[in-house]
Image (cartoon, rainbow, N blue to C red):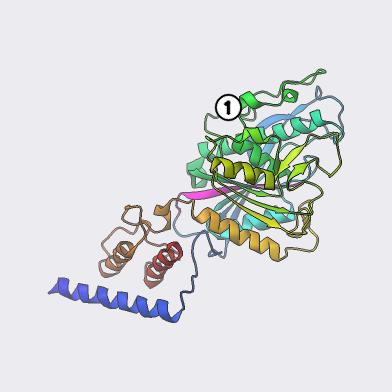
Amino acid sequence: MIFKYKFLITINILKYLTVFIFFTSFSFTNIRYIDEIFENIIKTENIVYANSPDLPFIFLLESNTYDINLDMDIYEPDEYEIISRPAIIFLHSGSFFTGNNELDDMVDLAESAARRGYVAITLNYRLGLNILSSYSGERAVYRGVQDLSAAIRFLRHNQSDFNINPEQVFVWGSSAGAIIGLHMAFSEDDERPQSTYGQWGDPDLGCIDCEGNNLQYSSRPNAVISCWGAIGDLEWIEQDHQVPLIFFHGTSDFIVPHDIGFPFTANITLPIIYGSSAISERLTELNIIHHYYLAENQGHEYYGTAGGTWIDGPNEYFYDIQDNVYEFLYNLIDIYILGDLNSDELVNISDVIIIINFILNTDMSTEHLDLNSDGLINILDIIYIVNIILVNS
């Protein structure tokens, strides 16, 4: 009799959900990793992740480097239940000559990511570039790749401290930051440019994972978001580099060409680079997952910044880019975190029934049932799973 009573309640709840979904016209709200569902975030500043030799602001040779600490700021959602969360590392623009992790776009992106449920990291990396030297340009990019390597290895080592899922570490770069992220996704030590070995008294920069710290973890990101980025050689992208990517680039970008060319349009003293269009063609040939958004007649940093500082933004492109990125990442994230309560690798009516049973029998474990992180397990969590089912259908 009790079983029959509970069964009828379950059926009635499901009927209620059907009516609710119909009258809301399938309106999706409060989806973690898609929407900004956390009002408050927690920021932890100046976390040192590496110690590396840095160049003075003005230099001719690199024999007078000095060691500095490299740091990051971490933004986290202020949530009721702490879970293992995907992380996004944000890398600023500045042509490897200027910039820092407190630029307008980096802070706004990190705060928005944290409100969606991610752990967001804004990174300081080493700067220093002679814009009249291809040799210097290659070395500047390589130092940035080494710093990103050190940061990823640091985060994976300290995953429990920052509540990070080490299999979901993503990189989001703007301009120079995107160039670093793309090289990190595809570079191998045996493909190092000759310039990185040093000459004229400049030091050998060492292997990709040999600088900053000695933590032994993979430095390969699980996905890269590239805003107006490029790579130094398409041949570095190989079949075994299955790193999903999403690109954004303007056809009128005269700083970083969207196809093939020199940085700053005609600076022949720097190396030729391959922009997003060329990279997308290469990825298509190799059947590597990627999405490419080409903005007609748009220039560099077309979401409203110059060197990471808001000029006429954030504009509509800034929000469109975020929407596309978070939909892209949503499909990469472990489905268990997104409502697979019975671990069958599906999110379906069976997971809805698990929460309904909890509501009817509060002696069950509450682990992972508070899906909207409001401190309660109720009809809103049921709606949350139903939304996930509809998004994925």
| Mark 1: amino acid | Asn
Count of numbered badges drawn on the protein:
1
Residue 388 screen position, x and y as percent: 43, 64
Image coords of residue 182 (percent x, y): 64, 41
Classify mark 1: residues with Cα within 10 Å, few (<14), some (14-19) or many (20+).
few
Split into 4 quadrants, where in the image is the C terminus?
bottom left
Which residues lie in the magenta part? 82-93
In the image, what residue occupies the spot 37% across and 67% down?
377
The structure residue drawn at horizontal position 40% and vertical position 79%, both measured from the top left corner, is 20
Residue 112 occupies quadrant: bottom right
Q: Secondary structure at mark 1?
A: loop
Q: Extreme front residue here?
A: 285
Q: Residue at x 80, y 47 (%)?
A: 255
Residue placed under numbered mark 1 in the picture: 214
Is residue 83 within the magenta segment? yes
Which of the two residues, 76 or 319, is positioned nearer the viewer here? Answer: 319
Position of 11 compared to 22: left or right?
A: left
In this view, the residue in front, 341 or 120, is: 341
Q: Is residue 144 left or right of residue 42?
A: right
Toward which corner of the image does residue 375 lie, by quadrant?
Answer: bottom left
